[in-house]
Amino acid sequence: MPGQSNLLIELQSVSYAYPGSKFPVLQDICLHVGKAEFISVIGPNGSGKSTLARLISGLLLPSAGRVLVDGMDTGTAETRKEIRRRVGLVLQNPDNQLVAAVVEEDVAFGPENLCLPPAEVRRRVEDAMNAVGLSQLRRRPPHMLSGGEKQRLAIAGLLALCPSCVVLDEPTSMLDPMGRQEVLQVLRHLSDSGTAVILITHHMDEAADADRVWVLGKGGVLVDDEPEAVFSRVKLLHKLGLTSTSAGDLAYRLSEQGLELPNGIVTMEDMIDYLCSVLK
Amino acid sequence: MQCIEVEGLTHVYFPGMPLETVALRGIELTVYDGEFIALAGAAGSGKSTLVLHFNGLLLPTAGSVRVFGRDITDKEYRRQLWRQVGLVFQFPERQIFSPTVFEDIAFGPRNMGCDSLTVNKRVKETLALVGLPEEIQAEDPRTLSGGMLRRVAICGVLAMRPQVLIMDEPGAGLEPAARQLILASIKEIQSQQGITVILITHHLEDAAVFADRVAVLHQGELLSVGKTGEVLSQTRILHKAGLKAPFAVEMAERLIESGIKLPTIPLTIEDAARLLHGLIKTTGVEPGGYNDG
Amino acid sequence: MMDNISIGQYLPACSMVHRLDPRAKLICIALEVPAVLMTFNLLSLALVSAWTLLAVILSGIKPRVYWHSLKPLWVLLLISFILQVFFTPGEPLIAVGIVTISHEGIVHSGWLLWRISVLLLLAAVLTFSTTPLQLTMALEWLLSPLRRLRIPVQELAMIINLALRFVPTLFDEARLLLLAQRSRGADFTSGSIKERVNRLVPFMVPLLTNIFSRADELAQAMEIRCYQVGAIRSRMRVLRFESADYAVLLVSLAILVTVVAMIIF
């Protein structure tokens, strides 16, 4: 659990109901995000994952409770722009979030909105394109990029704002395995270099890569724990229509067949280690 | 019995332009009646372009495509092809246009000339096939959850009772249970009604569980085609195609590398569980004797 | 429709024409268009043609591409040429039945064909070599005096920019929808007008729905990236006239002046 000095985002008893709806999508959520933390969010369709992403990035305001970013309330009009700059959001469909017809011009959109001097804009664009590995493609029109490249471009567009946290709403669901891997590598790199990452995903193997996992369901956060702990709770995950990771599922099936397995087998490595120890 | 025969198929987009791209090059592929075949490949490998030929929406630049023995360049035949070959596009819910679920599913059957009794019957039956309740017919599609909406959209094609069903990533963007449900019901329709299913996917775990055969495409060329077990255990070819081998296959390979002998290569988690259970039981090491850390 | 590149498309290349200031290019076009329209003798026509040809060559894009992208328009032009030839009165050269071809007809329509071709080539050079954003920046600069009249020039430029950015995306969307509905037996081509309009519903409804949801996501994405309507934005690249820009502007102006002079004197 991050200490007070390490705290970046805090959700205090947050509830949200869409206008005109009596039933809240999210109810009484308490969560916190530390600096440079890598968190993944899983949950069935309709569990409020996207709503949560929009609450954290300040696009939606809670019906009750507060969302604090660096101590600033997302509901306060004066600090809204400051919060926007600090928390970025990447959406599922990369096509809908790219605004310019050339890669580098798209990356420049954010810093231009901040009205930074041209030299500073160019420096940030350079840095952001390098961070996601798109410098070679700077003159390309976005519709001629692959899915993975488009999502990396969307991330670069946010990095140019120098955010402290990037929220991604199922950024990989339209990508092929290579594209997914590209995006995940970029995210890992981001979190290593000090930016917090909140990744919403349907791919459990992706989610297991994070430092911490939030499981959403029934309008609330059901689990907030390390991947090893979350993906060992196979029964709960199945009840939600989710699965464990592939390794976690295999471990579960083996234990169902009467084998006694150690806890916390979640990744391929864990499984190989275990199998080597019993089969050699 | 062959159902689709592809010979030397080449398709070029924008011929003669700076954007000229060869989407398919010299494809040779036969799809057999009643089989479940997966077309695997990374984005841009030509999977989608290939299947657009199967119901006559695209014509070959070179080579030929025959469906049920007839060439798709025959204009009259091509215009009727949609009745036999159903195509579920990626994110099919984006094509829903009707105010009620019933209307949307009825669109295809009505275009085929079915009378209203038949249409009613078909809508009902199709909903049952994918595990949706009958009452959903009257609902407004916009009020449904992602997984339900996807199934409704798929029903729109299923209700036409195609002999060949092509599906482009039917589980994309859905939670694991919803995608399993969709694929399992398609598998059941295939085995019960004997239709041919062509599944486009880059998620080989699904191919491992459901497909009889797998074809791998890479940059417009056919890299490999064969029985699911044969193709999916060739990890080198899969990696070349930009795909990830199923978990069980990759794990088996790692185990073999570290000197553990396996009698077979498991394809699915279920296979792997069965195999490993047997192995652990016979090696005689007390499983409880394993100490963590 | 997908198998052709329209003249509105930007084609990346690293040519002299690509590097010119978009404002210079836009002004050149503004000068060249009246010059082309006013040509009346061979010398002036040769002058504007040569200047345009030079631009085509220096654009670094193969002549074949120009040929292909303008092909659909050539057909149209050719048809109008033939009609012109037949319907321009004058001294008959050949007469077959009621059809007469006059000397004036050929000259007149040849002239027209040539001038329109030059104009189309000019438009093609501009759009092939200039990104939509550069174009809108240039347009914004040219229109900036209108800000005094409280016309939101910056916002208009942004709207044009977004429209251009989304043309290929919406094109793909429309194509996919057409294919999808056709594969369910939708028929968009037969029946009476009323029937046809009804038959467009399965195409238009999802198209509009999808466009709205895209627009909604786009608005969110722009908001997240700190865009605010009415707020002053900076630019990554400040447009600056270089000597080459002045040179092409001068040449274009000289050509216009020459053409006008030939008319007057």
Image (spheres, helix red, strand yellow):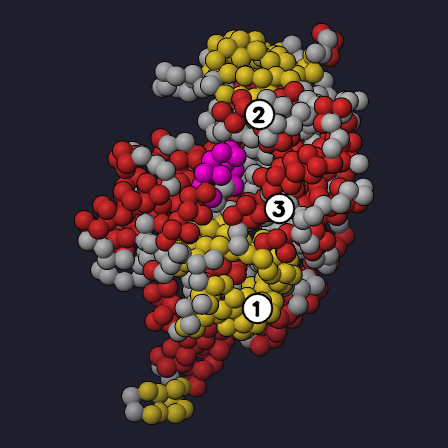
Question: Secondary structure of the magenta portion, mostly?
Answer: helix
Residue A22 lies in quadrant: top left
Q: Which residue, given by chain and number where applicable, does mark 2 sit on? A: A234
Q: Secondary structure at mark 1?
A: strand
Q: Position of residue A145 (x, y in %)?
A: 63, 49
The numbered mark at residue B267 is 3
The local secondary structure at tag 2 comes to helix
Callout 1: 10 Å neighbours few (<14), some, many (20+)? some
Q: Mark 1 or mark 2, which is nearer to you?
A: 2
Judged by depth in the image, the label closer to the viewer, 1 or 3, is 3
- Regarding residue B14, the answer to whether it shows in the image is no
The residue depicted at 35 percent of the width and 47 percent of the height is B156
Tags 1 and 2 on a common chain: no
User: Which residue position holds label 1?
Assistant: B28
Q: Position of residue C120 (x, y in %)?
A: 54, 64
The one of A17 and C64 positioned closer to us in this rendering:
A17
Magenta region, residue range? B172-183
Q: Determine whether, in the image, residue A127 is placed left or right of residue A200.
A: right
Name the residue nearer the viewer: A266 or B55: A266
Mark 2 surroundings within 10 Å by alpha-carbon count, few (fewer than 14), some (14 through 19), many (20 or more): many
Residue B196 in sight? yes
